[in-house]
Image (cartoon, grey):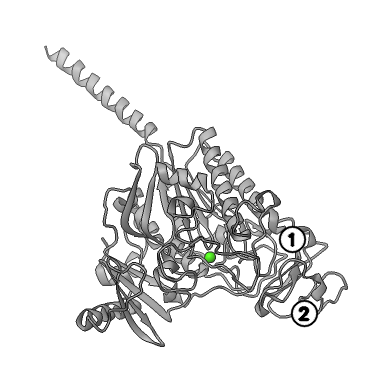
Amino acid sequence: MKKIIASTAWLLVLCLFAACHDDANNRKQPNVVMIYADDIGYSDVGVYGAALIPTPNIDKLAAEGIRFTDGHCAASTCSPSRYALLTGEMGFRKKITIQPVNAPALIQPGQFTLGSLFQQAGYQTAIIGKWHLGLGNGNMDWNKKITAGPNDVGFDYSFIIPSSNDRSPFVFVENDKVYKHDPNDPITVSLTPIHDSIPGTKYPDALENPESITVYQGDKNHQCSVINGVGRIGYMKGGKKALWKDVDIADNLVDKAKNFINRNDDKPFFLLLTTNDIHAPRLPHPRFKGATTLGYRGDNVVQLDWCVGQITELLKEKGLEENTIVIFSSDNGPVFIDGGYEDGSNEGGHDANGIYRGGKYSIYEGGTRVPFIIKWPGKIKPQVSSALVSQVDMLASFAHYFNITVPNITNLDTRNYWNALMGIDKKGAHVLIEQMNSDRGLALRKDHMKYIYFNNRGGELYDLDKDPSEENNILEQHPELSEKLHNELMRLKENHLNTVYGVE
Ligand code: CA
């Protein structure tokens, strides 16, 4: 009898071991691909209401995952928004605004980022696309190894547009070097005009050589070096072989993203694909020209949708679809003519911000309420969610999923809303700060109320349930509530969210 019990117990141990082992194999960490578009407004894609712009690939993601109707980027311009996504801290705390030519690195080596989190969880990490968070120390030699950059703050691989497609330098940087750098044609990058010591190395100057502008002139800030017929911010000389071609940028980024996925298909990976589309100057590849009746802006959205399709189809082909979380969102709201580039973009019956007020640069909902889609087959039930979610919370939410503690989290704004991101919690964040390019305007979202404070013109109060378009400022009708929300916003302006509310 004893012998039977002993062997049964042994068998049980063996079974448990086998079960655990199996479980560990089956629970391979999901890959995460975040496709982060530039300047895409709430209603710029079909599933969010863009009837005139076909976006079948983005619509399919939404149909198979969660489409958030109250999903936000952290700021209504690029640099503070991207900083918050990566670091979990609102950009206004560091006075971050749109970064100029030769801006130093905003994220210093040692600062914990979304990339660091995935690395700590055992992932291969990459950022491919626009960076615009500064590089180096502000006095950079573009012909040498570039530090600090994405590879120093959580990314194993990077292939970036250093700042933005409208400003110098007009080259990609792969890991820590200018891509296709030619030592015989050294690069100089400057915000001020460059002296042409070796004739022929300097690019035409928009003011000295107006005939070189064959595509777009741009406003007065964008009338420095002329590249590919377009005036830009800042100057550059040298690096002819390294110059990007605007019409090929989407293809270049997709190629690099596919290569990264192919290289890492046997281990968990995190890919942050920060597309150039649809930031001005807009120059879609000829195969997308005329894809819409809305000019190049609409055509560029179609190009963006093609990029999304290229990535999702590759994941499917490789059998990675089931175990990959795909996120699609944007870094800020929409803009039509930006940088003075008269590219013929027209509204033509298209509402880029839907029913929401404002767009890029604005503190109103159109500034930060953007498309926000998450797909994870088998784990997330397809649905539309009105939960309040923000990109600043990605860091704490994924940290929760991985059971990793974010260093110094009490001095950050990122909070864990994993259940909302997974479609389980239908409410999401109980509080959210919205910001424009700087802290000149900040807003507090609390329940259905939104309080805005402009440094130069005081407060405004809106009830988003009754007035989602923020047309009726009801501040004077609700003095007590306004004062309460004002005091809370001012407290949050001075203190991180986790300092005020504690870590959830
Ligand atoms: Ca942007």
Q: Quadrant of the N terminus?
A: top left
Which residue occupies the foreground of this view, 98 or 395? 98
Type of residue at label 1? Leu
Residue 296: image x %, image y %? Answer: 63, 59
What is the distance, in whole Å, between disc 1 and disc 2 at their CAs?
21 Å
Q: How would you rate the neighbour count of disc 2 (Cα within 10 Å): few for under 14, some for 14-19, many for 20 or more?
A: some
Instruction: Tell me: 405 left or right of 94.
Output: left
**Farthest residue in the front direction?**
349
Decide: is 173 above or below 305.
Answer: below
Would you place residue 384 above or below residue 186 in this image?
above
Under circle 2, the secondary element is loop
Q: Secondary structure at mark 1?
A: loop
Which residue position is annotated with label 2?
207
Q: Position of residue 16 (x, y in %)?
A: 26, 27
Disc assigned to residue 243: 1
Position of 240 with respect to 1 (left or right) is right
Q: Earlier in the sequence, mark 1 or mark 2?
A: 2
- Residue 417 appears in view: no
